[in-house]
Amino acid sequence: MPFLLFHLIPLAAIFTGVTWTAVILFLVMFWGRMFCITAGYHRYFAHRSYKTSRVFQFLLAFGGAASAQKGPLWWAGNHRMHHRYSDQPQDVHTPKKGFWWSHAGWVLGDDANHQPEGTMKEFTKYPEIRWIDKHDWVAIWGSAIMCLLIGGWSGLVIGFFLSTVCLWHSVFLINSLAHIWGSRRFETTDTSRNNFWLALLTMGEGWHNNHHRYAHLARQGLYWWEIDASYYILRGLAKLHIVWDLKEPKPEWLTDRAVQTVDDLAVPD
Ligand SMILES: [Zn+2]
Ligand SMILES: [Zn+2]
């Protein structure tokens, strides 16, 4: 119910109007938090595809938590299960259980509260990561209040609530549509696809077949025309020494059509 009601709140824009400040807040909140999910929750916490400082690690976790997609340990732990058991019964959001289940149903079910045990050992040693994982509401309501203070009621309704709903469904599309619609470069053991439009919408996550083949890489668009905004920003942050040791593909991997092996699915140390 709270999930459905959340979707209705942006309708309050009929009463608040849509100010320019609210539009700018929408864009900043959508793309800013999208980066924290794609480069933070996904490529860093779930796949450890680059290294960073403890401070930036926390900022990524905080920004991801502000997206109202639960904490980094829960998100990345479940995502590791998705790679380990892609499209098998243990995969929490396989589209084999139906499109809506893979899109949002699994988040709303009882199983969604379950934190897969022992999947995030490298990060549970950080008390600040455990804290934000447990108290993600601080980031959620903190950013909502910030939108209210900057943009008034319109800022809250459009800048926070509407951007959160759009962010949810954009990220969810990677679990649902990116396993259904698009092309397959690699013969992986799952149903993952590459999709240009989803890649634009999600800052590079639409190259999902590439990603299932080489899950440990910091980049998901493997060619220059495979637009991967998260990777470009990570490259920029690497130049500033905020992140480092980005895992890059070897040239010969691009033409390797081999079927995925169990070793490819392991999270490297
Ligand atoms: Zn997938
Ligand atoms: Zn992944």
Image: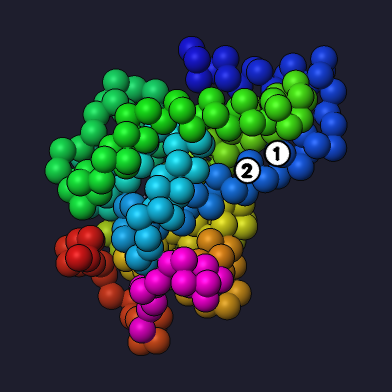
Q: Residue furthest left?
A: 118
Q: From the viewer's perspective, is 7 left or right of 13?
A: left
Is residue 133 highlighted in magenta? no
Residue closer to the observer: 76 or 240? 240
Three-letter code for the amino acid on which mark 2 is drawn? Phe
Q: Position of residue 262 (x, y in %)?
A: 17, 63
Quadrant location of the C terminus in the rendered image: bottom left
Report the residue at 32% width, 58% height from top. 47
**34 lies left or right of 252:** right
Q: Which mark is residue 166?
A: none
The residue under the point 46% across, 28% down is: 138
Q: Is residue 237 magenta?
A: yes
Report the magenta residues as a range: 235-250
In x, y percent, where is residue 83? 28, 52
Q: Is residue 256 above or below residue 97?
A: below
In contact (CB < 8 Å): disc 1 and disc 2: yes
The residue tagged 1 is 26
Residue 211: image location, x then y, percent: 39, 63
The quarter of the displayed image where residue 157 is located: top right
Q: Is residue 182 above or below residue 146?
A: below
The residue that appears at 48% across and 62% down in the rendered structure is 207
Q: Which residue is mark 2?
A: 30
Whether residue 11 is visible here, answered yes or no, is yes
Give the number of callouts: 2
Q: Amino acid at mark 1?
A: Phe
- Whether residue 85 is visible, yes or no, is no
Q: CA distance from mark 1 to mark 2?
A: 6 Å
